[in-house]
Amino acid sequence: MTLSYDDVVAKYEPVLGLEVHVELNTNSKMFCGCSTVFGAEPNTQTCPVCLALPGALPVVNEKAIESTIKIGLALNCSIAPFSRFARKNYFYPDMPKNFQISQYDEPICVDGYVDVEIETDEGPKKFRVEVERVHMEEDTGKSLHVGGATGRIHGAEYSLLDYNRAGIPLVEIVTKIVPGTGKYAPEVAKAYVAELRDILRALGVSDVKMEQGSLRCDANVSLRLIGAEKLGTRSETKNVNSLRSVERAVRGEMIRHAELLNAGGRVVQETRHFQEDTGLTRSGRSKEQAEDYRYFPEPDLVPVAPDAAWIEELRATLPERPSIRRKRLQEVWAVPDKEMSAMINADVLDIVEATVLLGSDPTKARSWWLGEISRIANDKNIAIANLAITPQDVAEIVALVNAGELTDKLARQVVEGVIAGEGQPADVVAKRGIKVVNDDGALMAAIEKVCAEQTETAEKVRNGHLPAAGALIGAVMKETKGQADAARVRELLLGHLGQATS
Amino acid sequence: MAAKLVAGETTSVALTQAHLDRIAAVDTDVHAFLYVDTEGALAQATAVDAKRAKGEKLSPLAGVPLALKDVMAQKGVPTTCGSKILEGWRPPYDSTVVANLKKNDIVILGKTNMDEFAMGSSTENSAYGPTHNPWDLSRIPGGSGGGSSAALAAFEAPLAIGTDTGGSIRQPAAVTGTVGVKPTYGGVSRFGLVAFSSSLDQAGPCARTVLDTALLHEAIAGHDPKDATSINAPVPQVVAAAKSGDVKGMKIGVVKELNGDGYQPGVRARFEESLELLAKAGAEIVEVSAPNFEYALAAYYLIAPSECSSNLARFDAMRYGLRVGDIDGASAESVMNLTREVGFGKEVKRRIILGTYALSSGYYDAYYGSAQKVRTLITQDFIKAFEKADVLVSPTCPTTAFKIGEKANDPLAMYLNDIATIPVNMAGIGGMSLPSGLADEDGLPVGFQIMSPVMKDERMYSVGAALEAALLTQWGAPLLDKAPIMGGAR
């Protein structure tokens, strides 16, 4: 029998801890000059350093340090004047050196926070998620286990290793424990990761694509009886590849823990893997016997000691905090909450803002990007940003509609043309010969022609059956190749058939 | 040799061939080389001769042959580090030292024998058999760079590259009657030096005279962006210092703790004699104390194994080198285990285990942490000592060359051989060993060690050159003239 979520939170208090790994979008790897582009042929982006050939030495990527400091500043952290890399020692075939260069007891950024706001039963409520540390490390390679049913190492016939990812700069952002969220733990977890993603995107330091693994979240969850001081045993859920999964994973783990505890059992400290299809987690590596990583300071690297003036320079370049920017835009544009969420979810905020800055009114800019253009992007299954249409194009189209030179319907054809690569809006209009027929004489001729052809329908309208007018208007639009303003056609048609227009 | 090349009295090809012939004649006895790159060396020599014929401006050592310690990656040439685990591995890249040698047109004859992964003081730990000391083939040539020093002493090469983690350049130089320098840590790039202990390893020049050593030093030294620990500063003017050999007014500090008990009488006698010569040359001899040196050996044997346990983790059969047990159905873990079991020798395993233990949680503070504190104290001892003296001196090692096999089963006795050389590595300063004569009791070479502050390497060359000149006057001929002549003419 599955316990209901309400039962869980009536008895237990959840405590969260979130670890987010972010792949930085630097051109080269953390400790060598190899490319970091995603999706290359296996092992083509490697060199003696990231393959750990004997004698090779790491050299820190300055750009990665800069990005990490920016992240720290954006998360309200203090930047350590002196921090060090350390070696985390363990054997695994996809880790070339059999140690990972990371930061251990001397991370570069410490003690920050992220404020998130979520909807509660009592309206919007702010939660502060405290950030313990932000540190730099390198990614491992990838193992591909071939043969066997599960795609996992157990039961595989053989494994292939791709070291392209080995050495890609990673930043790990670790929160302090987050108590006090009560039943909103899943929402807070999701809101935190979403806010983090927005901040990182605004900083331009990462692609933050959860589905490609450039932003990965490990959700730690434990339960304790409400009012209890002592923390419960936590589980660490990996493989959480979307914002929705963050929420589902936390909720699922809370229920699983509660069922175990209610049955008199105990929670095992372990890594668990989130299953996208079921929303449940599966047991992974036990952490009951903590692995001994034998950390020690990396002797091949010198300490990172960023100069205070440089840190201030970086602080000055920080973009507006995404949550503040969203509030500002929503206010200026006078957008309802729901529409705002839709824009955020569709990831069109930047592009809409750019369109508005080019002169379009916010409502029209929003409806183009969120409507027609999003639909085309979905049909083509590509990202909006990759369509061949720019904020400039959309602003021009909006201007043409406002000037009465295009109807909405014609404007859609122009959008289509621009996306099809036929040029800028003006080119498409010229090439396709698109123009609004606003010559009443030409319209009247078409109306008379249509009424003469469909006498029966015309008669119905003349007798006051207005819905029948639709068919006639359609025929007129067809006659004028869609270049007429339908509202004007309706007006003229009804007048012609002796019906007053309102 | 370089002068004769410049004067056109000989060619690099002739010189290289002569050394290849010498290697063919004596190396079955000495076993200084693990690999002789006849073709590569002659090709390089031919190229240098062609450049010279065209009148190109060449570096001072252009065309002179050199023996390379097998711990340095050289593109396309086997690099084993004296270990079975790297048997057959040919690096796809050049270490920075090799790149610098090639840039200076120095001809690389081949790779020299060493204790496996530079762990040892006798070259007995090589997986490919020991090197023999040209002074007495039944004795060790020192280690870990015994191959490089023996090659110099046996006239198989006039120049050699060594690496020094706790004395691996200086102790072999001492026991073979040759010169060896460990530059300031960071003075020579470690890129392509297969790491034993990253914070202690330093490559350096070896030769038969102080000036040759200085010329080679300048050829290989300098900042390297590929090594984050490399020092971004001009190379100390060691050639000028070696040429002037001026010690007038210099203060030379004798380290009280690096002499006396445990040092062989002949070693002490030669040391005292050298001090007198330096005083006569115008230096002021003072005594300095370094009370924390007595902990250096213990701290070294925590730091070096700790770092090596991590550095050597990459030898896992996955990407290169030996692979054992890769039969149907074997897991990666079992292949790793078997390969490391078979591929590493006893001393290497001992140190990996020691280091793994020292870094373990719960032991870290007591072992690795304390060792790092000792390291700081040693560095402070040096700083204080250098306030009283421009350079510090001591015997390079407590004894002359011991017999092969004599200490093979007593690691502690073996470790004690490095007692005077280790503090230099711990503090990252420069150290030189040059011959100070033969011990009366066994007729074997004794080394004199000179230590100089960070990036003041020129000081040890000034003192070394002065002492070398004074000793040469006293002896009438280079010390190596007294070594047994092997394989006919040199």
Image (spheres, rainbow, N blue to C red):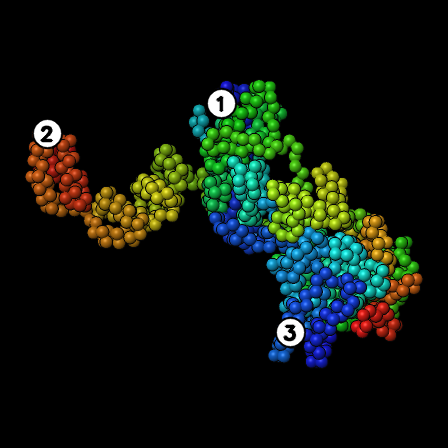
| Residue occupying the point 90% across, 54% down | B261
Q: Which mark is residue A5?
A: 1
Residue furthest to the front in view is B328
At mark 1, the secondary structure is helix
Of A373 and B5, nearer the camera is B5
**Residue labelled with disc 2:** A464
Check the picture and name the quadrant holding the N terminus of chain B: bottom right
Of B298 and B85, nearer the camera is B85
**Residue labelled with disc 3:** B46
Q: Residues within 10 Å of mark 3 (few under 14, many from 20)?
A: some
| Residue occupying the point 65% across, 61% down | B77
| Residue occupying the point 68% across, 55% down | B87
Q: Amino acid at mark 2?
A: Gly
**Distance from the alpha carbon under mark 2 to that under mark 3:** 107 Å
Q: Are marks 1 and 3 on the same chain?
A: no
Check the picture and name the quadrant holding the C terminus of chain B: bottom right
Against A494, residue B114 (above or below) is below
Chain label for disc 2:
A
**Distance from the alpha carbon under mark 1 to that under mark 3:** 82 Å
Q: Are circles 2 and 3 on residues that touch, CB within 8 Å?
A: no
Q: Which mark is residue B161?
A: none
Residue A339 quadrant: top left
Q: Amino acid at mark 1?
A: Tyr
| Residue occupying the point 66% across, 51% down | B322
